[in-house]
Amino acid sequence: MRKQVFAVLALAGAALLAAAGGASGQQNIITRQMFESMLSHRGDSGCQGAFYTYDAFTQAAARFPAFGTTGDDGTRRRELAAFFGQTSHETTGGWPTAPGGPFAWGYCRVEEQKQTDPPYYGRGPIQLTHKYNYEQAGRALNLDLVGDPGLVSRNPTVAFDTALWFWMTPQAAKPSCHDVITGRWAPGADDRRAGRLPGYGLLTNIINGGLECGKGQPTGGDSDRVGFYRRYCQMLGAAEGGNLSCENQTPYAPAG
């Protein structure tokens, strides 16, 4: 019995160390100062983004210890640049002549302005949308997001939780964004025929491919996502990699 107790304590301790290591690994790259610099306009007049805090981000990231800590330093920086690039587009308040440029205005929005598919419209950094996504995220996070979808836009930690859940979780035929950007996913024959190859562009396909991908030229949304990503790669000292656009990728079949 004593050996079993020691074994349980050892496993618990290892889990805590892994979570702590994940949090410290992310914070070594996304410091509070860097977070504020990357998202400097989020609290400006006309934006709702003061809702998003550094502490909420780090608390949520600690629940996903592989996020921003997988691979070598370059891979970690690229994943963090990609995550903030995609989520900054989802929450952008920028415009072509905005102060600091259009890619300085990520995390301006908390809720989708058009509010499609009420009450399960876009909320939080990833703009979680549709009942099936709220249901799956709520199940994974042990939250009743179907009964109370507004929790995502009232609690900033929950908002980041849902974004990181989506980022880290494969869905249907789609790999996770995390596995793609860290090089843990390899395309199969069907993916190769569809032009779905590793790179930042595949993340756009995973998130919103039906509207933004496979048009033969970059769409506005696709280009905007790339613009944010390039800015953050420069700020974080990350290599962009290839395949940034999804213009020649066949979108995944709709979920739901």
Image (cartoon, rainbow, N blue to C red):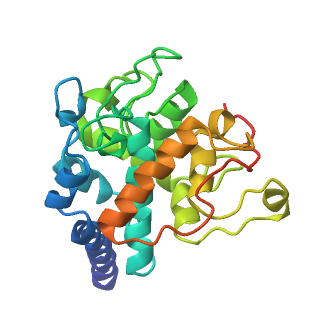
- Taking the view exactly as shown, the residue that stands out farthest to the bottom is 3
Q: Is residue 228 above or below residue 220?
A: below
Q: Is residue 112 above or below residue 25?
A: above
The x, y position of residue 170, in whole percent, is 60, 53
The x, y position of residue 66, in whole percent, is 41, 67
The x, y position of residue 15, in whole percent, is 32, 71
Residue at image position (72%, 49%) is: 173
Left or right of residue 179, residue 13 in this image: left
Residue at image position (30%, 39%) is: 105
Residue at image position (41%, 77%) is: 74
The x, y position of residue 235, in whole percent, is 30, 64
Q: Is residue 214 above or below residue 243?
A: above
**Residue nearest the observer in this picture, 12 or 139:** 139
Residue at image position (43%, 67%) is: 78
Quadrant the N terminus occupies:
bottom left
Q: Is residue 22 visible?
A: yes
- Taking the view exactly as shown, the residue that stands out farthest to the left is 33
**Residue nearest the observer in this picture, 213 or 99:** 99
Left or right of residue 162, residue 49 in this image: left
Q: Is residue 162 visible?
A: no
- Taking the view exactly as shown, the residue that stands out farthest to the front is 97
Left or right of residue 23, residue 223 in this image: right
Q: Quadrant of residue 48?
A: top left
Tag count: 0
Q: Is residue 160 above or below residue 12?
A: above
Quadrant the C terminus occupies:
top right
